[in-house]
Image (cartoon, rainbow, N blue to C red):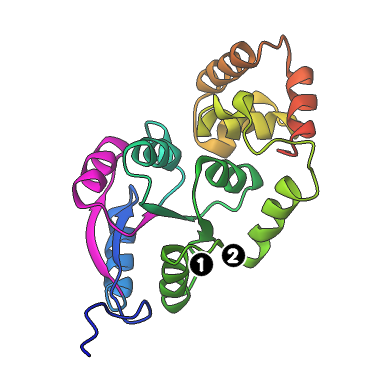
Amino acid sequence: MTESVAQPEDRRLTVFLVDDHAMFRAGVRAELGVHVDVVGEASTVAEAISRIAAVQPDVVLLDVHMPDGGGRAVLESVRRSHPQVKFLALSVSDAAEDVIGLIRAGARGYVTKTISPDELAAAVRRVADGDAVFSPRLAGFVLDAFASRPDVPVADPELDQLTNREREVLRLLARGYAYKEIAKELFISIKTVETHVSNVLRKLQMSNRYELSRWAADRRLV
């Protein structure tokens, strides 16, 4: 009897790369292409949404911090129309709020860019098979958020309405950074920091940074 379908471990997966750094995409494509079929790549949110919908890969490797809403905007848009596509975050960031935010949005895993090519290929395979995959230290964030804190809902509408950049500003603000220090840390102007803080206050319906700090601490964003 002829086997018409390859065994899961033998089938070459299709993978799409989303990252706004061309050199990084080229490196991942070269290394990962040995193990999987890299069927496309994108450097912007809009480009990623359009191209992923066109090719419908098995797994999308997704950078977190990009302009226009970042990787989360890509994930949320694609999942509405193509829920079968799985996402694995691949980021330089190991901040707890980034990890939790992407998992809340529907990513199946989160690994940092220090991962080796072989480990990344294995992570892609596991995500395609339905497993959840995290870099070792990051798994603790997820356990803390979803297991040891049953009082914190998986969906957090208040947090979800903030952009990635607004969350970064909020996290630093809650840690006691001054506006000037936040601007230096994030390579943005003080005026831009002020705008982000104003937006966060408005969205969360709060009046000062001390309320924001307590709110962030309650959600373990600090």
Quadrant placement of the N terminus: bottom left
Q: Does 144 appear in magenta?
A: no
In the rendered view, does 110 fall on the left or right side of 37? right
- Dot 2: within a 10 Å radius of its alpha carbon, few (fewer than 14), some, or many (20 or more) residues? some
- Dot 1: within a 10 Å radius of its alpha carbon, few (fewer than 14), some, or many (20 or more) residues? few
Where's residue 155, x and y in %? 62, 34
* Location of residue 110 with respect to 170 vertically, above or below: below
SS category of the residue bearing label 1? loop
Q: Nearer the viewer, mark 2 or mark 1?
A: 2
SS category of the residue bearing label 2? loop
Q: Nearer the viewer, residue 159 or 115?
A: 159
Where's residue 129, x and y in %? 44, 67
Q: Magenta part of the protein: which range?
A: 36-61
Task: Give me the residue at 42% from left, 67% from top.
Answer: 124
Where's residue 135, x and y in %? 59, 65
Whether the residues at callouts 2 and 1 have beta carbons within 8 Å, the answer is: yes
Q: Does 37 appear in magenta?
A: yes
Disc 2: which residue: 135
Q: Nearer the viewer, residue 159 or 213?
A: 159
In the rendered view, does 177 fall on the left or right side of 135? right
- Amino acid type shown at disc 1: Thr
Quarter occupied by residue 48 = top left
Task: Give me the residue at 30% from left, 69% from top.
Answer: 13
Task: Give me the residue at 26% from left, 47% from top.
Answer: 52
Quadrant placement of the C terminus: top right
- Amino acid type shown at disc 2: Ser
For the residues labelled 2 and 1, the Cα–Cα distance comes to 10 Å
Q: Nearer the viewer, residue 197 or 181?
A: 197
Q: Give the label on residue 114, or none.
A: 1
